[in-house]
Image (cartoon, rainbow, N blue to C red):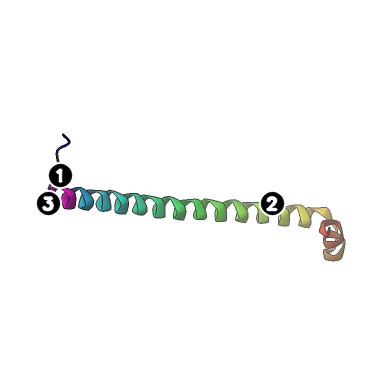
Amino acid sequence: MARKKTIEAIETEISKVKSDMSKLQDRYDKLAKKLEELQEQKHRIEADTIMEAYLKSGKNFDEIMTFLSP
């Protein structure tokens, strides 16, 4: 016959699971923020690279936009 858990034991286990979930949520939030920061860094580098290429190209804005437009 299976042994029944006491309410206190279950409440302790619930508290531990909630605590573990909170720690995981904190870790997730930190990783999500780091990902966002890295994506912003990448976009800035890409934008700088595009601007450098534009300035070196000798093309005017309209020519560049015509080329980039779908």
Q: CA distance from mark 3 to mark 2?
A: 61 Å
The x and y percentages for residue 14 are 22, 51
Q: Nearer the viewer, mark 1 or mark 3?
A: 1
Please tell me whether mark 3 sits on a helix, a strand or a loop: helix
5 or 33: nearer the viewer: 5
Q: Which residue is mark 2?
A: 49
Picture residue at 86% right of the left edge, 56% below the top: 67
14 or 22: nearer the viewer: 14
The x and y percentages for residue 18 are 27, 53
Q: Which residue is mark 3?
A: 8
Please rate how many residues cluster around mark 2, counting C-alpha atoms within 10 Å: few if below 14, some from 14 to 19, many from 20.
few
Q: Nearer the viewer, mark 3 or mark 2?
A: 3
Quadrant of the frame with the N terminus: top left
Picture residue at 76% right of the left edge, 52% below the top: 53
Please tell me whether mark 2 sits on a helix, a strand or a loop: helix
What amino acid is found at the position of numbered circle 3 in the picture?
Answer: Glu
**Residue most extreme to the front:** 1
Q: Which residue is mark 1?
A: 5
**Would you place residue 29 above or below residue 1 in this image?**
below
Mark 2 or 1, nearer chain start: 1
What amino acid is found at the position of numbered circle 1 in the picture?
Answer: Lys
* Image quadrant assignment for residue 3: top left
The disc at residue 34 is none
- Relative placement, left or right, of 3 versus 45 is left
Please rate how many residues cluster around mark 3, counting C-alpha atoms within 10 Å: few if below 14, some from 14 to 19, many from 20.
few
Residue segment shown in magenta: 5-12
